[in-house]
Image (cartoon, helix red, strand yellow):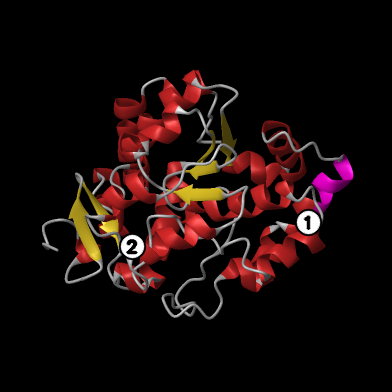
């Protein structure tokens, strides 16, 4: 990987450049196998987002909703490997592409398939067949800070030792894995708007504010009606405190991460960006927001900056 790409990836062998973006542990031939070999099922639910937007959190909530708040049944399915630990379907360097796809093919239905793929590279067959999709969005300033700490603590990303200021430059210019947050989000938003009923948008801030209410929304979307009591059980089980202590969700002991630097589930709050952005960075980011996003956030009702 050329040092001209971005400082975090200098001399990091697990970073690939293909299909007009950077990838972590995803070789160029993965997409061909992915499109051709991953079986498409009518009851699949695809979970999409830009990295560090709350995808692992949403993944846990989706599975708890599928089990209608029966946490014992959920934990049994996890222990029997009927549910995979969270990892985007395209990520992974310890197993071959064939083995990774075989793992997904052998899972029982229904499946929740998480991915950070941009819309332009998402499987066309899934879109054509109108499979259900959940799209997660988060204030991009908080995404930037979370992504910074993720780079610092992750072997696949080279245990980045640079400064926040340098990382900010890479984030705002889109010179990171999965590219620009702005381009990634703008690629998905029209699809979300045009497919009401088949795509559910979750906002990180709403999940943080009232997770039980979001569990009820998800249940209605997945045709898994749940009671208010079940929604409360899901909210308790999937709280940041519980997920941080849960070996199935917290990645404790994962050799690919150094938790002495930053944990996979780090803070789980809204507004941490204010502890990092300088006034100049905030100004530049807001200008980039206005230039790239225009009125998209208001059109979609995102209110991402709250």
Horizontal arrangement in the rendering, residue 111 relative to residue 127 (left or right): right
User: Quick check: 94 left or right of 146?
Assistant: left
Query: Disc 1 vs disc 2: Cβ atoms closer than 8 Å?
Result: no
> What's the magenta bit mostly, secondary-structure-wise?
helix
Q: Quadrant of the N terminus?
A: bottom left
Image-quadrant location for residue 185: top left
Q: What residue appears at the point 75 percent right and 38 percent down from the top-left corner?
A: 224
| Label 2: few (<14), some (14–19) or many (≥20) C-alpha neighbours in 10 Å | many
Residue 236, labelled with which disc?
1
Q: Is residue 195 visible?
A: yes
Q: Please, is residue 204 above or below residue 254 in the view?
A: above
* Residue underneath mark 2: 97
What is the quadrant of residue 213 in the picture?
Answer: top right
Whole-percent x, y for residue 34 in the image = 35, 50
**In x, y percent, where is residue 291?**
29, 26
Kindly state the secondary structure of the residue where label 2 is placed. helix
Task: Look at the picture and state if 91 lies above or below 299.
Answer: below
Query: Residue 234, image x and y in percent?
Result: 77, 52
Whether residue 218 is in magenta: the answer is no
Magenta highlight range? 228-233
Which quarter shows the C terminus?
A: top right
Viewer-closest of 108 and 297: 108
Q: Residue at x 42, y 27 (%)?
A: 128
Q: CA distance from mark 1 to mark 2?
A: 36 Å
| Residue 226 on image: x %, y % | 82, 40
User: Disc 1 on helix, strand or loop?
Assistant: helix
Q: Earlier in the sequence, mark 1 or mark 2?
A: 2
Res 54 visible? no
Side of 268 relative to 212 (left or right): left
Q: Residue at x 55, y 24 (%)?
A: 301
């Amino acid at each position: 990987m050329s040092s001209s790409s971005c400082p975090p990836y200098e001399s990091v062998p697990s970073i690939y450049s293909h299909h007009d973006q950077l990838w972590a542990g995803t070789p160029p031939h993965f997409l061909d196998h992915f499109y051709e070999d991953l079986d498409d099922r009518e009851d699949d639910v695809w979970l999409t987002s830009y990295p560090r937007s709350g995808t692992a959190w949403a993944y846990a909530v989706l599975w708890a909703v599928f089990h209608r708040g029966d946490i014992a049944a959920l934990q049994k399915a996890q222990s029997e490997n009927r549910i995979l630990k969270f990892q985007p379907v395209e990520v992974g360097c310890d197993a071959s592409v064939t083995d990774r796809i075989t793992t997904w093919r052998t899972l029982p239905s229904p499946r929740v398939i998480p991915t950070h793929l941009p819309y332009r590279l998402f499987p066309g067959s899934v879109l054509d067949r109108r499979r259900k999709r959940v799209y997660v969005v988060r204030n991009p300033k908080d995404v930037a800070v979370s992504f910074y700490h993720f780079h610092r603590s992750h072997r696949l990303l080279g245990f980045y030792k640079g400064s926040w200021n340098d990382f900010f430059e890479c984030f705002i210019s889109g010179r990171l894995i999965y590219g620009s947050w702005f381009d990634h989000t703008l690629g998905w938003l029209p699809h979300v708007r045009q497919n009401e009923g088949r795509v559910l948008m979750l906002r990180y801030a709403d999940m943080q504010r009232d997770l039980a209410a979001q569990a009820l929304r998800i249940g209605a979307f997945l045709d898994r009606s749940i009671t208010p009591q079940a929604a409360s059980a899901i909210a308790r089980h999937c709280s940041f405190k519980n997920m941080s202590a849960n070996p199935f969700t917290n990645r404790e002991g994962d050799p690919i991460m150094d938790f002495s630097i930053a944990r996979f589930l780090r803070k789980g709050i809204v507004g941490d960006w204010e502890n990092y952005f300088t006034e100049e960075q905030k100004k530049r980011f807001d200008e980039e927001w206005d230039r790239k996003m225009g009125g998209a956030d208001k059109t979609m009702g995102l209110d991402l900056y709250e």
